[in-house]
Amino acid sequence: MESESDPNPLRRAFFRFAERGAALSARYHRARLLGAQHLPAAGPILLVGNHGLWGYETPTFFHLLHRATGRYPLGLAERGFFKIPVVKTLLPWLGGVEGTRRKALEALGGGHLVVCYPGGAWETFKKPRHHYTLRWEETLGFARLAAQARVPLVPFAGFGVDGTFVCPEDERWSVALAPGEKYRVPLGMPLPLPVKMTFALGRPLPPPAPEASESELKRFRDRVATQVRHLLVRACHA
C-alpha cells in the first residue's frame, strides 16, 4: 500500500479507505499473525506462501504485516490485472506490483517486504478438494527471483483462507481458466463466512546461489513448499 504521506489526495483517500476495510476484515475474521519476529525492521525480504480462495485474505494479511512491523508490504500480482484499465491504476495504490521479474527485482532492490503467491490463480480458484494444497506445479520463478536478488525468503501459511466462501459442486457454476480446468464460483452471500484466519511466518531461508542449477532451484522450491505445509499445520492448531 502507498503511505499516508502520499502527496496525491485521491490516492491518499483511497489508501485510507482500503486500510480501514482491511482492519475491519481482520477484526471480522479474528485474524492474527504468528512469527512476526522473523521479519526484519528494515531491508528486503521475499515472503512466499499459499493463496486463499479468490485471494480475499490478502488485505487482511497485509494489514497484519503492517501492524506488526510498521512496514507496508508489496504484493506481486497477476500480470493480466495490469491490462484492465481501472484495475491497473488502483492496484499500485494498494501495494500491487506487476508480477514480472523486472518489477519484482525493483521492489526488492528498494528494500521492501515483497509477498509472492506462486500458485497465483491456480490456488485462488481451487476446487473444494484442493483446499490448503499448494498448486505451485513446476514453477521456479520465486526461487530464481530469490537467487537473483540475493535476499532471504520467509515462508508463510494462512489457515482459514479457504473457508471464507462456499463453492457449489455443480460445474455449471464455474469459470474456465485453462483447457480442461474449471473453477467453481462461490455461492452468493451477503458477507464472507466469519471464519478465523491465522497466518504463520517461518524462519528466513538463505536464497540459492545466483549460479544455482535448475536441480538446485527445484530442491529449494520443494524445501519452501515443505515449510509452508508445516506452517499450515501450525496455523491450524494455534
Image (cartoon, helix red, strand yellow):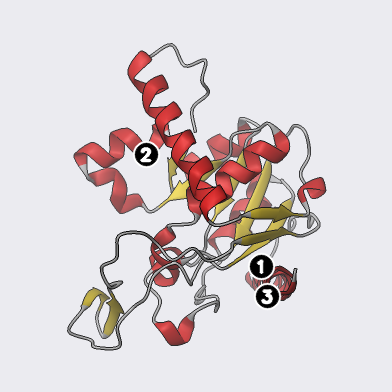
Judged from the image, the secondary structure of the residue bearing numbered disc 3 is helix
Q: Earlier in the sequence, mark 1 or mark 3?
A: 1
Question: Above or below — where is 177 with respect to 150?
Answer: below
Residue nearest the observer in this picture, 27 or 115: 27
Residue 235 location in percent, x, y? 70, 68
Give the residue at mark 2.
91
The residue lying furthest to the top in this view is 7
Specify few, some or many for label 1: CA neighbours under 10 Å numbering under 14, 14-19, or 20 or more. many
- Residue 73 lies, in percent from the top left, at 58, 39
Indicate the position of residue 209 as horizontal and vertical percent values: 75, 56
Task: Please identify the quadrant where the C terminus is shown.
Answer: bottom right
* Left-right relation of 152 to 71: right
Kind of residue at disc 3 = Arg
Q: Which label's residue is closer to the chain start, 3 or 2?
A: 2
According to the picture, the residue beneath numbered tag 1 turns out to be 217
Residue sitting at 58 percent across and 64 percent down?
Answer: 196
Q: Secondary structure at mark 2?
A: helix
The residue under the point 24% across, 45% down is: 83
Residue 228, quarter of the rendered image? bottom right
- Residue for badge 3: 229
Contact (Cβ within 8 Å) of mark 3 with mark 2? no
The amino acid type of the residue labelled 1 equals Leu
At label 2, the amino acid type is Leu
